[in-house]
Image: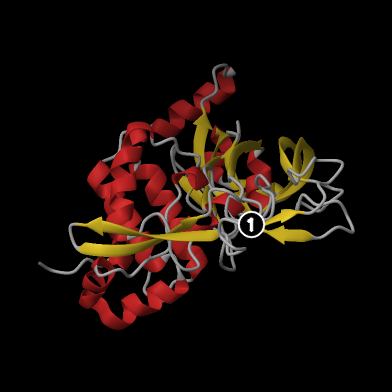
Amino acid sequence: MASKDYYQILGVARNGSQQEIKEAFRKKAMEHHPDRGGDAQKFKEINEAYQALGDAQTRAQYDQYGSSFEQMRRQGFQGAGFDPREFGFDIGDLSDLFSGLGDIFGFGGGRGGRGSDRGRSGRDIELEIAVPFEDAVHGGVREIEIEKINACARCGGNGAEPGSGFKNCSTCGGKGQVSKVVNSFFGAMQTVTACGSCHGIGKYPEKECGACHGKGVSRGKRVLKVKIPAGMEDGGTIRFAGEGEAVRGGRAGDLYLRVRVRESKDFERRDQDIWSKIAIAFKAAALGGVVDVPTVDGLKELKIPAGTQSGAVIKLKGLGVPHLRAAGRGDHFVEVHIKVPTHLSRGQKKILEEWEE
């Protein structure tokens, strides 16, 4: 059987960064999650691919050993680990399925992976923000207020009263992990999971913080300034590292802000170009001239060639949407429509009649 190309499954380049791999996995997992109508087998493949590529050390071994990697993993090699809660999922009845797979493929833990950090990593937060059309084109700054679990201001999130120390967990000896041997179809395998007593932290405060009572966190409101980059697309996501929910003794999750761009009554966006319509007088269409047209950069002069027909499109170069990750802008296309006069004087009618002849 041919080996699987995990890069192709996640849709990332072989030289892609770890952050690109994480974002690709997150997008694919949300798209194919069974609770959202996705295919369970495809979801499993996506998760399996992240086991190999989500951790830099595991990825290096996959790049080195290629088709032999899967055999190595079946023999006990462990990968990045997958925690559906990181993506706001509730897998429900599928939990038994994936917990079983975890014993075989190492989904539940791994050296340096998210599985070993389950008790020490806060949840990610997903929110939406609506922005005006012009802000999506030129960029802007918006303020949002979110209520979430934050690190305790008094103890900094470690749960200990300032000035006091910590003691090691008696269950895991301060490691934050416990190992066990599992008999599987492939033989005896050793798995590593977060310690259930200390939730993966490995230590307890000698004296609990008086503000959070040892929890290290508290719920409250936080105001964030959101910088909307120029060229932002509708449905695009902005990531704020560490602005998710906090957790005692670990790192906070991330905030993923999905941008919804409000429709404009004057403009329509098509990729990096902007389209609009304008009505011009019959005389201007026939003889040509210059008219002022609204653009996202204000009023601009538009040259109307003589003999312009209704429905003609004229381009204003470089007045479109900026490229999000490159220099330059798209163009602004103006669709011209001719206003036919409804009231004509006798002289005007005579001129038109003579012109038609």
In-front residue for pair 306/294? 294
Crowd class of label 1 (few under 14; some 14 to 19; many from 20; radius 10 Å) = some
Residue 273 or residue 254, whichever sits in front: 254
Q: Position of residue 113 (x, y in %)?
A: 48, 63
- According to the picture, the residue beneath numbered tag 1 turns out to be 169
- Give the color scheme: rainbow, by chain, secondary structure or one colour: secondary structure
The front one of 329 and 286 is: 329
Q: Residue at 25% x, 77% y: name it.
A: 66
Question: Looking at the image, is 97 positioned above or below residue 106?
Answer: above
State the image coordinates of residue 333 (x, y, percent, origin top left): 52, 48
Three-letter amino acid code at disc 1? Answer: Cys
Looking at this view, name the residue that lies furthest to the bottom: 64
Quarter placement of the C terminus: top left
Of the 4 image quadrants, the one containing the N terminus is bottom left
Q: Secondary structure at mark 1?
A: loop
Foreground residue among 13 and 88: 88
Measuring from the top left, give residue 275's x and y in whole percent.
Answer: 52, 44
Which residue occupies 82% across, 50% down? 207
